[in-house]
Amino acid sequence: MEKQPAQNMELLAPAGTIEAFEAAVESGADAIYIGAPAFNASVAAARAGNKNIFFAIAIITNR
């Protein structure tokens, strides 16, 4: 059996709130997934609206 080369792992973090998004960024997540209101089953996420998505984009692009 041939040895496979080591692969780097990537940390993918969920962010249901803007606070969770900020914590994931500060903790060094490689990727963060968020649900757009129309595609999210969470009632809280649906109430948050798109403004949090735009705020999250602003946070990450200003780092």
Image (tube, rainbow, N blue to C red):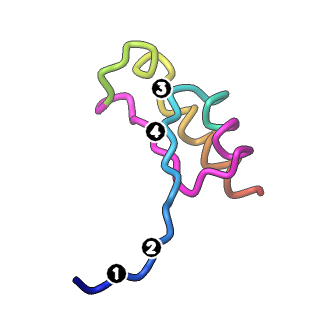
Query: Cα distance, mark 3 to mark 4?
Result: 12 Å
Query: Cα distance, mark 1 to mark 2?
Result: 9 Å
| Disc 1 versus disc 3: nearer the observer | 1
Which callout, 1 or 3, points at the residue further toward the start of the chain?
1
Q: Secondary structure at mark 3?
A: loop
Which image quarter: residue 38? Answer: top left
Which image quarter: residue 56? Answer: top right
| Disc 3 versus disc 4: nearer the observer | 4
Q: Quadrant of the N terminus?
A: bottom left
- The answer to whether the residues at label 1 and label 3 have Cβ atoms under 8 Å apart is no
Q: Which residue is mark 2?
A: 7
Q: Secondary structure at mark 1?
A: loop
Which residue ends up furthest to the bottom in the rendered image?
2
Which callout, 3 or 4, points at the residue further toward the start of the chain?
4
Which callout, 2 or 4, points at the residue further toward the start of the chain?
2
On residue 63, the disc is: none
* Circle 1 Cα neighbour tier, 10 Å, few/some/many (<14 / 14–19 / ≥20): few
* Circle 3 Cα neighbour tier, 10 Å, few/some/many (<14 / 14–19 / ≥20): some
Query: Cα distance, mark 1 to mark 3?
Result: 44 Å
Q: Which residue is mark 3?
A: 49
Q: Secondary structure at mark 4?
A: loop
Q: Residue at x 51, y 42 (%)?
A: 13
Question: What's the residue type where badge 3 is placed?
Answer: Gly
- The answer to whether the residues at label 3 and label 4 have Cβ atoms under 8 Å apart is no
Which callout, 2 or 3, points at the residue further toward the start of the chain?
2
Question: What's the residue type where badge 1 is placed?
Answer: Gln
Q: Which residue is mark 4?
A: 34
Question: What's the residue type where badge 2 is placed?
Answer: Gln
Residue range highlighted in magenta: 22-39
Query: Cα distance, mark 2 to mark 3?
Result: 37 Å
Q: Residue at x 58, y 42 (%)?
A: 54
